[in-house]
Image (cartoon, rainbow, N blue to C red):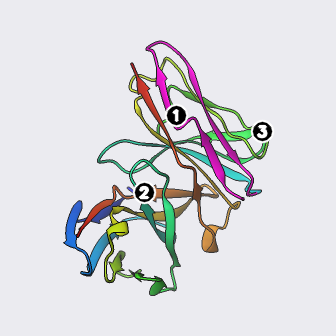
Amino acid sequence: DGGITQSPKYLFRKEGQNVTLSCEQNLNHDAMYWYRQDPGQGLRLIYYSQIVNDFQKGDIAEGYSVSREKKESFPLTVTSAQKNPTAFYLCASSTPRGPTNTEAFFGQGTRLTVV
Amino acid sequence: KNQVEQSPQSLIILEGKNCTLQCNYTVSPFSNLRWYKQDTGRGPVSLTIMTFSENTKSNGRYTATLDADTKQSSLHITASQLSDSASYICVVSVLTSGTYKYIFGTGTRLKVLA
């Protein structure tokens, strides 16, 4: 089946640790995105990538890092510098540019909790 | 500032009833507007997408309307079912520095009761 897969579904992190969230897609989409969702707020863009080996900071990139070594994969690392990492993280992909008749496909999300 | 506001914040209706959710946006330049359904703990799933020139788009019991002049959209759900219980998110696409970005509303949480 074509789609976008995030793993793990639940993740627990101790304070001071880095953790990496996985996002894989087999839709042949060039563009991939990472969002953070907090209660009562809209999705906020962390990082996005329009093409392999290139990515751009979103609105809340501090404390996060990404890589885009393969078209299919866009992992997100939550570093110890992120002061409030507990949230629901969503990965998305879409066809490149001109999204007039396209849509963003979302993964099922990863819920990260700092313990 | 590009913003998307949705109302109401939450809504409770009885099964079989209709309801309408609202979305107002101040996004420019506007590219398209989408409505997503998000079940609790899951990723959003697209319901409809409309460009500037489209006024209405249907997907089964879901009908979205768009008034680009007043920058308003609505999502009408007909004959609601228990499975409609979810958050509904309005998303507007904007062209910024040659790249399309998505501006998300905070969503309307719908609860359908038997």
Q: Are dots 3 and 2 in contact, CB under 8 Å? A: no
Is residue B30 at least partly visible in the picture? no
Which image quadrant is residue B113 in? bottom left
Q: Was residue A11 drawn as part of the magenta stretch in this picture?
A: yes
Q: Residue furthest top?
A: A16
The residue sitting at 38% across, 82% down in the picture is B69
Given the image, on which type of amino acid does mark 3 rest? Asn
The residue sitting at 26% across, 81% down in the picture is B16
Q: Chain of mark 1?
A: A
**Element type at marker 1?**
loop
Chain part drawn in magenta: A1-27
Residue density around tag 1, few if under 14, some if 14–19, many if 20 or more, within 10 Å: some
Give the x, y percent position of residue A10: 49, 33
Given the image, on which type of amino acid does mark 2 rest? Phe
Q: Chain of mark 3?
A: A
Quarter of the figure that contains the C terminus of chain B: bottom left
Given the image, on which type of amino acid does mark 1 rest? Ala
Give the x, y percent position of residue A7: 60, 37
The residue sitting at 68% across, 52% down in the picture is A31
Q: Which mark is residue B104?
A: 2
Q: Which one is nearer the viewer's eye here, A20 or B56?
A: A20
Would residue B5 be found to the left or right of residue B13 on screen? right
Mark 1 lies on residue: A61
**Element type at marker 3?**
loop
Label 1 and label 2: CA atoms lie apart by: 17 Å
Q: Which mark is residue B13?
A: none
Q: Chain of mark 2?
A: B
Q: How many marks?
A: 3
Mark 3 lies on residue: A53
